[in-house]
Image (spheres, rainbow, N blue to C red):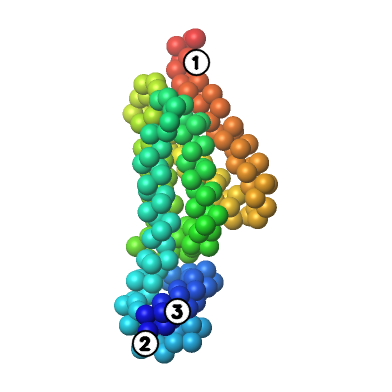
Amino acid sequence: MQYQKEEVRARIFASALDEFEKYGYKDANMRRIAKSAQVATGNLYRYFESKNDIFDEIVKAVYSRISSFIEEASKLEGYRRGDVKILAGYITEGIMKIHEGYGRELLIIADKSTGSKHENFLQVLCDMIFERIKHEMSFDIQDTDDILIRILSLGFVDGIFMILRSVSDKMRREELISRMLILYFDDIEKRLCGHRAIISGG
């Protein structure tokens, strides 16, 4: 009996994954999910109370993993404060690993979550990365420069997800990610502080 319940739950989950991927959270329909899973609509509600409940189940592994590895990013073995490129590489590697195991779920929460409590996922991710990068800067940076770090964080996240959406070949993805890390983070301290040298005549 327990096996049967788990099998039905798995069918519902797979059907919901297809539904959210195709229609997004806002336009997803519980009746279609039930029909595709070959489950009566009333029976569906025995497993999941609402569309929101199913969506949370689908995306929770992605959200919790991203939160955890960004928090742990500053605890890298051999990591020295201020090496933002290593930090960014660690974050990127974590997102790529999540994509390998939960690729569909990751893109659903990023692109198909409008109307759900997760609709600001990408902004939340940008904010988390902004805070982590700012904290790890080895040099003093004025409050007026926060916008530069926010621009950096936003471009970094947008770049990762653009690559994940558009490139299916793993080796090509890794190549583009590597080049993107160079583009964004090589000599980042010098580039962020460069305006001060210009103003001071240095």
Nearer the N terminus, badge 3 or badge 2? 3
Q: Is residue 148 left or right of residue 45?
A: right
Q: Say what secondary structure mark 2 lies in.
A: helix
Instruction: State the image coordinates of residue 37 (x, y, percent, origin top left).
Output: 48, 82
Residue at the spot of label 2: 43
Q: Is residue 125 left or right of residue 49?
A: right
Nearer the N terminus, badge 2 or badge 1? 2
- Crowd band around label 2 with a 10 angstrom C-alpha radius: few (<14), some (14–19), many (20+): few
How many labels sit on residues? Answer: 3
C-alpha separation, residue under disc 1 versus residue under disc 3: 65 Å
C-alpha separation, residue under disc 3 versus residue under disc 2: 13 Å
Question: Which residue is nearer to you in this view: 1 or 105?
Answer: 1
At 46% from the left and 21% from the top, the residue drawn is 193
Residue 198 — which label?
Answer: 1
Instruction: State the image coordinates of residue 65 (x, y, percent, origin top left).
Output: 41, 51
Query: Pointer 3 and pointer 2: residues touching (CB < 8 Å)?
Result: no
Q: Say what secondary structure mark 1 lies in.
A: helix
In the rendered structure, which amino acid carries the disc numbered 1? Ile
Residue at the spot of label 3: 7
Residue 128 — which label?
Answer: none
In the rendered structure, which amino acid carries the disc numbered 2? Asn
Q: Is residue 90 left or right of residue 71?
A: right
- Crowd band around label 3 with a 10 angstrom C-alpha radius: few (<14), some (14–19), many (20+): few
Query: Pointer 1 and pointer 3: residues touching (CB < 8 Å)?
Result: no
In the rendered structure, which amino acid carries the disc numbered 3? Glu
Question: Which residue is nearer to you in this view: 152 or 53?
Answer: 53
